[in-house]
C-alpha cells in the first residue's frame, strides 16, 4: 500500500504550525492559572469581541485548511512498475475541498451568477454565417436550458435551500450548546435557551449565535450555489473569483501574522532598551531607526525583494516545485516587511518606556535590587502590551495593503500566489474596461474588510479586558436615568426642557 | 439681605458603570454677597461636582436631575447654553487646582486674559491692553508690562496661579469659585495666594466659594463653613462656631485626626472604614457605619437638620431635640477617650544607623548638537545628616528644594555626584551593583503617590513578593523575626495583616483599592524585606486627613514594634511635629537648620524656617501670630544666588549675605543653623550680627 499523497511542509507552513503550537500551549497554560484566566474571561464578556471572534474563527479555519499542503500521487501507467510518482503541483486541503471551484475554469470574465461570458465572441454558425454574441459558460449555469427564464428562480431556490441547511446546522449547534451549558450548570435546557435569548449568560452567547446564524446561512447559500455558478464571477483567465478570495485569506493571514512576529522582537527589544537604559544605548538605537525610517520604505523593500528574486532565478535547483519557490518568496517578503516596519512601534515603545521608567513602582523595584531584565519583563513589558496589541492590529490591515501596493509595483508576492494584493492589482485594469468588471475588486475588498474589521473589534475587546483600569461589565448595563425634571412638569416650566437638553447632551 | 447664590436641593448624578453615582444628592446652600463660604470635605464627597454643577460644566456623563441654582434670583438651570456663556466668567468665575494645567501653553498671558475681556466687555486694542495690565498689577505680578507678553512656562507655579486668578477676575465676577486653589502650591506660596484672594475680595466685594479639604485654609479664609460628606452637606456654621465647637461626629473626627505636637504620644483618632460608594442607596445617616455614636435610629432614618446654635445647623440625630440630649455628652466623653497610646519612649539613640556627609547630586544640563555640558542643576549641594537607630529625622522643605533627591541619593537610586553615604559603617557610594544589592534589604522607600507606586498589572501578592524574591529574604533568617518562622506563602498574609489589610486581598489588583489601602500595600512591600531604615517620601500628602491619620498611626506603631528608623521627607509641618525626633530644614539643595523637633519648631533660628513655620495655616480661631511674608519664589537650582541662597527673599539680608555662604552656628549640641545673623565659627566680627539677631 503506497501513500496517495506526499505531505509537503513549506516554510510558511512550518511557521504557522509553530504559531498554532505556541497559541495552544499558551491556552493550556492560561487555563491552569486562574489569575491569567480572569482577563480572558472578561474578553468573553464583550459582545462585539465575541462576535468578531466568531467571524475570525471562520477566516482562520480557511487559512489553516489552506496551510496543509501535499502533493497528490499521479497514476503512472508508463511501464507498470510500482514506482510511485507525485504530481509537481502542490495542493492544500482547501484546494481539494474547493476542487470544483479550482478546476472549472472559464474562458475569460463572467459576472457573478452569469450563465454567459462577459465578452462577445464571434461564433461560426453551422450554416457558415457568423454572429457575435455572449456565449454560454462552460460550467456556470450550464445545467440550465434557458438561462434567461430560469436563472433567477434557480439561484433563489438553491440559495434558499443552502441557507436552510445552514440554519439547520445552526439549530443543531444551538441545541448542542445549550445542552452542554445546561449540563454544566445543572439547569433545564429550555431555561438555558431562554437565558441565552435574554443575554443573561456570562458569555454573550446571543451575540455569538446571531453572528453564527448569519455566517452559516451565507456559507450554506454560497456552497450550494458555487457548485453550479461562479458566485463572485470569474477573472480574466476564467478563474473563479470566490476561489481566489478564499485562497487570499491565507496569504493575508500569513503576511499579517508572520510579519508582525518578525517585527516584534526588534520593536520590543530595541524600543524598551532605548527607553529604559537611556544614554548611549538610546542614542545608537535612535540613530538606527531614524536612518532606517528616512529611507523610502518601498525602495528598500524593492531592492531586497529584487535581490532575492535574482538569486532564486539563478538557483532554480533549490526548489522542487513552483509552490516552494512562491512560498519562500512570501516568507522573505514577510521578513523584509518586518525588518523595515518596526521603527514606528519602536518609537512608540521608547516613548512609553521613558515615561514608565520614572514611575514609582519601577523606582521601588530598583530599591529592591531587582535585575534590569526582571524589571523589563515584569514591570515594563506588561504595561506596554496594550500599545503592542493596538499597533499590531493596526499594522495587520496596513500590511495587507502594503502587500497589495508591492504586488502592484511588481515586488510583492510571487505571481503564482493568489493574494488580495494580486487581485486588487489585476482589478486596476478591469476598472478601466468598458463595461466595467467590478466583482474582483469588490470581493477582495469585502473579504479584506470583514477580516480586518473583525480583527480590530476583537483586539479592542482584548485591550479593554487587559487594561485593569477599564472595568468591563457583563452585558446588561443599567439604563441611565434621564430627564426626570422634564417629565415632571413640562407645562409649568417651558424652558426647562431646553435647559436640560443643553446640560446633558 | 438676599443671598447672592442660592442652591436648592441640587442633585447631580454621574452615569458611570452599572448604577448611577449620586455625586451631589440634595444639596442646599446660600452664599451672601461678599462673603467667603468654605465647602469642606474629603476627596470623593462631591465638592468639585457641586462647583461644576454651578458652572454647568459637568463632564459628559454628568447630569443635573433636580434642584435649582439661582444667582441673584435667576435660575441658571433654566438658561439656554448661549445665555450661560454670559454667566461664566462674567457673573461666576472659577479657578482650578492645578495652575500648570489650567493655562494654555501656546498663548501669552495677555491673550488669555483678553479672551475674557473681549467676550464680556468687547474691549479691543489699546483699552484692552490697558485693562490687562491693570488686572495683572492687581494680582501682584511684578513688572507686569513686560511679563504680560510672556508664555505660561516662563512663570513659576505661584505666579501661574496669580495669572489664573487674574483671568477669573477679568470679568469682575460676583462670585468666585476656587476649587482647591492652593493645594498644588507650597506653604509660602499658598500664604501669598490666600493673602491675594483676601485682598481682592475686600477690594471688589465679591463672594468666594472656597472648596478645600484643608482645615487650616478654612480657618484662615472662611466666614461660613459647610462640611460635605457623601454627596450632602452635614453641617453648616460660621467659622467661629465651627472651630469652637464642631457638632457633627464626622467634623469632630476630622479635627481629632489632625496630627500635631500635642498628640505625639498617642495614636491619632481615625475614622474607621472609608467613604461609602455614592452609587449605593442610603437609608439612614450616611455616616452611621463609621460613627462611634450611631444607634438604631441612625441606620433607619436619615437625620433632618437640627439647630445647634444660631447659624449653626447639623444633620445628626444626636442634636435632635426629640431624641434627647443623652448623646451630647458622649461625644465630649469620646473625645477625651485615650487613643491607643504609644510608649513614649525617651529618645535614647546611641548607635548611628546612617551618616550622610556632604552629599551632592548634580544633574548636567546638555545643550547644542554635541550635547555639551553647559551647567549643572545642583539639586542636592552638600547635605550632611545622621539618623540614629530607631529614630525619625524629618526633612522639611518646599517643592524643588531637593528633598526627594536626597532620599533617592541615599538609596543609590540616583548616583550621587560627590559625598558619602555611610550605612551602618558601610560606604554605599561607589559600591558595585552586586554588592549594593546585598544591602538593599536594609533600607527601603515609600513613595508619595500610592497610585503610581504600585504596578497596575501585578497582583498584590506578586508586588509584595517581588522584593523578597529579588533579595532572597525568604532564605535568610528574618532579623526582625516577624516572618521568618512562617511557611512559604504565609509571609504575605502576615505582612498584609500587619498593615491592617485582610489576607484575601492579596489576589487582587491595585486598582481595586483606595489611596490609603494602596499606601498600606506599599508599606507592606517595603516591610517584606525586613528593612531597618525606611525613607518615607511624602507618604501622606496625596491622602485625606482621616486616611493620613491611619497611615501615621501605622508608621508609628511599626516603629515601636520593629525599631525602624525613618527619614521622613515632607512639607507638612504638623506631621513633623507629630512624628519626628529631629528636623532638618532644606532650602535649595542645602540644609539651613537642623535640630530636635522642639528646638527647630519651637525656636526657629533661620529666617527661612521662621517664614516657613509662620506661613502654615493653623487650625485655630485666633491665630496670634505674625505671618512673615516671603516675596518671590524658590530660585532655580541651576543658577543659585551667590552667597547665602536665601538672601534674595530674606527680610534680614545684609551685605555679607550676598557674598559668602554662611558657616554653621551651634545653639546646642543638636541645634545648628547656617545664617550670618548668628556667630560664625571662624568669624570674629560677630557683634554686628548679634545686633541683627535681636531684630528678628
Image (cartoon, coloured by chain):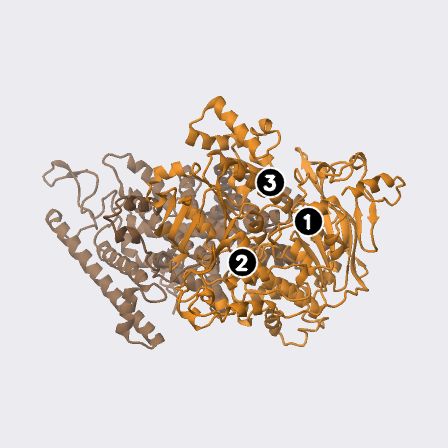
Chain colours: A brown, B orange
Query: At which x and y percent is residue B334?
Result: 57, 69
**Which residue is disc 1 drawn over?**
B613
Looking at the rendered structure, the secondary structure element under dot 1 is: helix
Residue B363 figure quarter: top right
Q: Is residue B213 left or right of residue A481?
A: right
**Which residue is disc 3 drawn over?**
B158
- Position of the N terminus of chain A, as image quadrant, is bottom left
Query: At which x and y percent is residue B214?
Result: 56, 52
Q: Is residue B158 left or right of residue A452?
A: right
Q: Quick one: label 1 or label 3, which is nearer the N terminus?
A: 3
| Residue A340 sits above or below residue B500 on the image | above
List the single residue furthest toward the front.
Answer: B310
Which numbered tag is attached to residue B660? Answer: none
Q: Residues within 10 Å of mark 2 (few under 14, many from 20)?
A: many
Nearer the observer, A123 or A458: A458
Alpha carbon distance from label 2 to label 3: 33 Å
Alpha carbon distance from label 1 to label 3: 18 Å
1 or 3: mark nearer the eye: 1
Disc 1 sits on a residue from what chain? B
Q: Is residue B185 left or right of residue A195?
A: right
Q: Residues within 10 Å of mark 3 (few under 14, many from 20)?
A: many
List the single residue furthest toward the top.
Answer: B126
Query: At which x and y percent is residue A446?
Result: 31, 47
Which numbered tag is attached to residue B456? Answer: 2
Q: Is residue A327 visible?
A: no
Disc 2 sits on a residue from what chain? B
| Residue B427 sits above or below residue B402 on the image | below
Q: Quick one: label 2 or label 3, which is nearer the N terminus?
A: 3
Looking at the rendered structure, the secondary structure element under dot 3 is: helix
Tags 2 and 1 on a common chain = yes
Amino acid at each position: 500500500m503506497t501513500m496517495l499523497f506526499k505531505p509537503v511542509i513549506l516554510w510558511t507552513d512550518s511557521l504557522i504550525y509553530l504559531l498554532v503550537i505556541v497559541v495552544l500551549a499558551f491556552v493550556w497554560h492560561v487555563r491552569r492559572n486562574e489569575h491569567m484566566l480572569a482577563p480572558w474571561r472578561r474578553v468573553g464578556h464583550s459582545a462585539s469581541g465575541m462576535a468578531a471572534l466568531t467571524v475570525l474563527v471562520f477566516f482562520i479555519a480557511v487559512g489553516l485548511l489552506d496551510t496543509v499542503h501535499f502533493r497528490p500521487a499521479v497514476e503512472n501507467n508508463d511501464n507498470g512498475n510500482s514506482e510511485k510518482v507525485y504530481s509537481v503541483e502542490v495542493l492544500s486541503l482547501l484546494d481539494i475541498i474547493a476542487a470544483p471551484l479550482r478546476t472549472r475554469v472559464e474562458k475569460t470574465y463572467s459576472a457573478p451568477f452569469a450563465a454567459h461570458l462577459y465578452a462577445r465572441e464571434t461564433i461560426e454558425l453551422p450554416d457558415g454565417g457568423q454572429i457575435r454574441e455572449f456565449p454560454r459558460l462552460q460550467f456556470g449555469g450550464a445545467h440550465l436550458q434557458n438561462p434567461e427564464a430560469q436563472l433567477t428562480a434557480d439561484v433563489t431556490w438553491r440559495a434558499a435551500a443552502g441557507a436552510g441547511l445552514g440554519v439547520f446546522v445552526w439549530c443543531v449547534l444551538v441545541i448542542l450548546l445549550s445542552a452542554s451549558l445546561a449540563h454544566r450548570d445543572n439547569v433545564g435546557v429550555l431555561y438555558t435557551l431562554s437565558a441565552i435569548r435574554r443575554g443573561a449568560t456570562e458569555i454573550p452567547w446571543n451575540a455569538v449565535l446571531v453572528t453564527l446564524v448569519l455566517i452559516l446561512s451565507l456559507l450554506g447559500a454560497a456552497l450550494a450555489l458555487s457548485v453550479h455558478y461562479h458566485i463572485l464571477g470569474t477573472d480574466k483567465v476564467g478563474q473563479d473569483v470566490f476561489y481566489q478570495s478564499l485562497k487570499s485569506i491565507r496569504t493575508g493571514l500569513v503576511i499579517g501574522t508572520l510579519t508582525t512576529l518578525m517585527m516584534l522582537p526588534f520593536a520590543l527589544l530595541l524600543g524598551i532598551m532605548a527607553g529604559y537604559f537611556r544614554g548611549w544605548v538610546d542614542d545608537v538605537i535612535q540613530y538606527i531607526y531614524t536612518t532606517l525610517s528616512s529611507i523610502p520604505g518601498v525602495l528598500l523593500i524593492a531592492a531586497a525583494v529584487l535581490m532575492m528574486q535574482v538569486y532564486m532565478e539563478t538557483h532554480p535547483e533549490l526548489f522542487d516545485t513552483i509552490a516552494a519557490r512562491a512560498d519562500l518568496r512570501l516568507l522573505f517578503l514577510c521578513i523584509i516587511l518586518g525588518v523595515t516596519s518596526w521603527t514606528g512601534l519602536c518609537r512608540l515603545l521608547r516613548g512609553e518606556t521613558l515615561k514608565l521608567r520614572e514611575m514609582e513602582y519601577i523606582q521601588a523595584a530598583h530599591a529592591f535590587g531587582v535585575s534590569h531584565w526582571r524589571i523589563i519583563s515584569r514591570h515594563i513589558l506588561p504595561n506596554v502590551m496594550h500599545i503592542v496589541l493596538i499597533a499590531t492590529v493596526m499594522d495587520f490591515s496596513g500590511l495587507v495593503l502594503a502587500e497589495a501596493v508591492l504586488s502592484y509595483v511588481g515586488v510583492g508576492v510571487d505571481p503564482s500566489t493568489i493574494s488580495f494584493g494580486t487581485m486588487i492589482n489585476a482589478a486596476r485594469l478591469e476598472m478601466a474596461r468598458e463595461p466595467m468588471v467590478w466583482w474582483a475588486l469588490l470581493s477582495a475588498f469585502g473579504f479584506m474588510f470583514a477580516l480586518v474589521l473583525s480583527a480590530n473589534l476583537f483586539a479592542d475587546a482584548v485591550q479593554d479586558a487587559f487594561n485593569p483600569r477599564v472595568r468591563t461589565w457583563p452585558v446588561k448595563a443599567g439604563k441611565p436615568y434621564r430627564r426626570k425634571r422634564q417629565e415632571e412638569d413640562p407645562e409649568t416650566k417651558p424652558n426647562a426642557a431646553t435647559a436640560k437638553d443643553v446640560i446633558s447632551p | 439681605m438676599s443671598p447672592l447664590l442660592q442652591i436648592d436641593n441640587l442633585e447631580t448624578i454621574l452615569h458611570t458603570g452599572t448604577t448611577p453615582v449620586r455625586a451631589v444628592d440634595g444639596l442646599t446652600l446660600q452664599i451672601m454677597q461678599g462673603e467667603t463660604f468654605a465647602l469642606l470635605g474629603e476627596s470623593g464627597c462631591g465638592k468639585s461636582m457641586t462647583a461644576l454643577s454651578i458652572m454647568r460644566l459637568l463632564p459628559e456623563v454628568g447630569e443635573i436631575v433636580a434642584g435649582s441654582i439661582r444667582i441673584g434670583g435667576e435660575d441658571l438651570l433654566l438658561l439656554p447654553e448661549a445665555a450661560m456663556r454670559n454667566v461664566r466668567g462674567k457673573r461666576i468665575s472659577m479657578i482650578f487646582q492645578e495652575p500648570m494645567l489650567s493655562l494654555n501653553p501656546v498663548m501669552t498671558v495677555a491673550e488669555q486674559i483678553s479672551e475674557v475681556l473681549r467676550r464680556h466687555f468687547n474691549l479691543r486694542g489699546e483699552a484692552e491692553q490697558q485693562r490687562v495690565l491693570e488686572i495683572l498689577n492687581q494680582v501682584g505680578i511684578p513688572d507686569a508690562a513686560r511679563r504680560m507678553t510672556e508664555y505660561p512656562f516662563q512663570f513659576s507655579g505661584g505666579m501661574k496661579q496669580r495669572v489664573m486668578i487674574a483671568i477669573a477676575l477679568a470679568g469682575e465676577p460676583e462670585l468666585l469659585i476656587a476649587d482647591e486653589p492652593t493645594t498644588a502650591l507650597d506653604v509660602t506660596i499658598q500664604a501669598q495666594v490666600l493673602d491675594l484672594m483676601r485682598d481682592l475680595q475686600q477690594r471688589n466685594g465679591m463672594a468666594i466659594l472656597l472648596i478645600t479639604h484643608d482645615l487650616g485654609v478654612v480657618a484662615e479664609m472662611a466666614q461660613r463653613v459647610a462640611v460635605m460628606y457623601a454627596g450632602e452637606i452635614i453641617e453648616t456654621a460660621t467659622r467661629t462656631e465651627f472651630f469652637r465647637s464642631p457638632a457633627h461626629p464626622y467634623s469632630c473626627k476630622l479635627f481629632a485626626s489632625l496630627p500635631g505636637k500635642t498628640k505625639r504620644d498617642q495614636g491619632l483618632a481615625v475614622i474607621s472604614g472609608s467613604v461609602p460608594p455614592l452609587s449605593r442607596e442610603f437609608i439612614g445617616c450616611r455616616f452611621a457605619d463609621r460613627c462611634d455614636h450611631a444607634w438604631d435610629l441612625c441606620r433607619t432614618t436619615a437625620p433632618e437638620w437640627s439647630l445647634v446654635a444660631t447659624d449653626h445647623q447639623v444633620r445628626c440625630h444626636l442634636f435632635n431635640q426629640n431624641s434627647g440630649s443623652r448623646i451630647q455628652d458622649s461625644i465630649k466623653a469620646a473625645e477625651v477617650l485615650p487613643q491607643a497610646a504609644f510608649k513614649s519612649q525617651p529618645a535614647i539613640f546611641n548607635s548611628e544607623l546612617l551618616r550622610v556627609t556632604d552629599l551632592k547630586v548634580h544633574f548636567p544640563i546638555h545643550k547644542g548638537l554635541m550635547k555639551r555640558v553647559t551647567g549643572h542643576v545642583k539639586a542636592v549641594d552638600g547635605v550632611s545628616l545622621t539618623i540614629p537607630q530607631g529614630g525619625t529625622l524629618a526633612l522639611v522643605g518646599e517643592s524643588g528644594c531637593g528633598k526627594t533627591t536626597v532620599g533617592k541619593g541615599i538609596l543609590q537610586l540616583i548616583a550621587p555626584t560627590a559625598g558619602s553615604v555611610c550605612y551602618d559603617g558601610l560606604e554605599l557610594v561607589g559600591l558595585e551593583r552586586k554588592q549594593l544589592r546585598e544591602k538593599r534589604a536594609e533600607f527601603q522607600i515609600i513613595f508619595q503617590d500610592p497610585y503610581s507606586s504600585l504596578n497596575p498589572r501585578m497582583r498584590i501578592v506578586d508586588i509584595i513578593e517581588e522584593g523578597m524574591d529579588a533579595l532572597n529574604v525568604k532564605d535568610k533568617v528574618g532579623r526582625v523575626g516577624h516572618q521568618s518562622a512562617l511557611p512559604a506563602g504565609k509571609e504575605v498574609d502576615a505582612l498584609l495583616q500587619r498593615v491592617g489589610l485582610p489576607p484575601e486581598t492579596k489576589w487582587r489588583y491595585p486598582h481595586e483599592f483606595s489611596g490609603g489601602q494602596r499606601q498600606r500595600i506599599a508599606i507592606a512591600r517595603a516591610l517584606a524585606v525586613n528593612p531597618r531604615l525606611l525613607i518615607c517620601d511624602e507618604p501622606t500628602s496625596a491622602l485625606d486627613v482621616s486616611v493620613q491619620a491611619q497611615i501615621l498611626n501605622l508608621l508609628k506603631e511599626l516603629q515601636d514594634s520593629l525599631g525602624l528608623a525613618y527619614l521622613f521627607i515632607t512639607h507638612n509641618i504638623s506631621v513633623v511635629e507629630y512624628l519626628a525626633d529631629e528636623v532638618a530644614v532644606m532650602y535649595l539643595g542645602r540644609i539651613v537648620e537642623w535640630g530636635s523637633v522642639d528646638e527647630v519648631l519651637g525656636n526657629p533660628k533661620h529666617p527661612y524656617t521662621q517664614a516657613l513655620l509662620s506661613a502654615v495655616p493653623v487650625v485655630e480661631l485666633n491665630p496670634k501670630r505674625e505671618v512673615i511674608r516671603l516675596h518671590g519664589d524658590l530660585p532655580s537650582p541651576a543658577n543659585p544666588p551667590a552667597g547665602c541662597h536665601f538672601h534674595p527673599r530674606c527680610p534680614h539680608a545684609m551685605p555679607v549675605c550676598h557674598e559668602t555662604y554662611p558657616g554653621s552656628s551651634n545653639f546646642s549640641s543638636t541645634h545648628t543653623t547656617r545664617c550670618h545673623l548668628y556667630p560664625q565659627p571662624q568669624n570674629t566680627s560677630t557683634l554686628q550680627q548679634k545686633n541683627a539677631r535681636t531684630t528678628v
